[in-house]
Image (cartoon, helix red, strand yellow):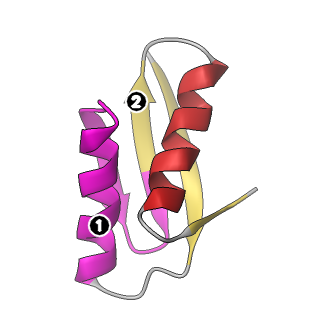
Amino acid sequence: MKEIEFKIEGMTCHHCVMAVKTELREAGFENFEVKLGSAKVGFDGSDEKSEKIVNAIEKAGYNVIE
């Protein structure tokens, strides 16, 4: 299993955390930990899944900091 931590810009409250968690679940991810300003996601597979994670975070309304 691969685990990557993503730094997230713009998260300020518990609602932000819940929005990111919801989008990650809807994208099919189950192994994650979301805190203010970051998300650590575990997954099997390829770089396509990393892109899918970034897309889920952006769909929640936040930017991933590279």
Q: Residue at x 44, y 13 (%)?
A: 44
| Quadrant of the frame with the N terminus | top left
Q: Is residue 38 magenta?
A: yes
Q: Residue at x 61, y 22 (%)?
A: 48
- The image shows residue 48, relative to residue 66, as above or below, that is above
Q: Is residue 36 magenta?
A: yes
Q: Residue at x 33, y 76 (%)?
A: 16
| Quadrant of the frame with the C terminus | bottom right
Q: Which one is nearer the viewer's eye here, 9 or 61? A: 61
Q: Residue at x 31, y 86 (%)?
A: 13
Q: Amino acid at mark 2?
A: Gly
Left-right relation of 50 to 34:
right
Q: Between disc 1 and disc 2, whose residue precedes?
A: 1
Give the image location of residue 51, x and y in percent. Answer: 61, 35
- The image shows residue 39, relative to residue 35, as above or below, that is above
Give the image location of residue 26, x and y in percent. Answer: 26, 41
Left-right relation of 16 to 44:
left
Q: Residue 42 has which mark?
A: 2
- The image shows residue 28, relative to residue 60, as above or below, that is above
Q: Which one is nearer the viewer's eye here, 19 or 13? A: 19
What's the magenta region? 14-39
**Residue 36 sits in which quadrant?**
bottom left
Question: Which residue is label 1 attached to?
Answer: 19
Q: Amino acid at mark 1?
A: Ala
Distance from the alpha carbon under mark 1 to that under mark 2: 18 Å
Neighbor class of circle 1 (other Cα within 10 Å; few <14, some 14-19, many 20+) is some
Give the image location of residue 60, x and y in percent. Answer: 41, 64
Give the image location of residue 28, x and y in percent. Answer: 29, 30
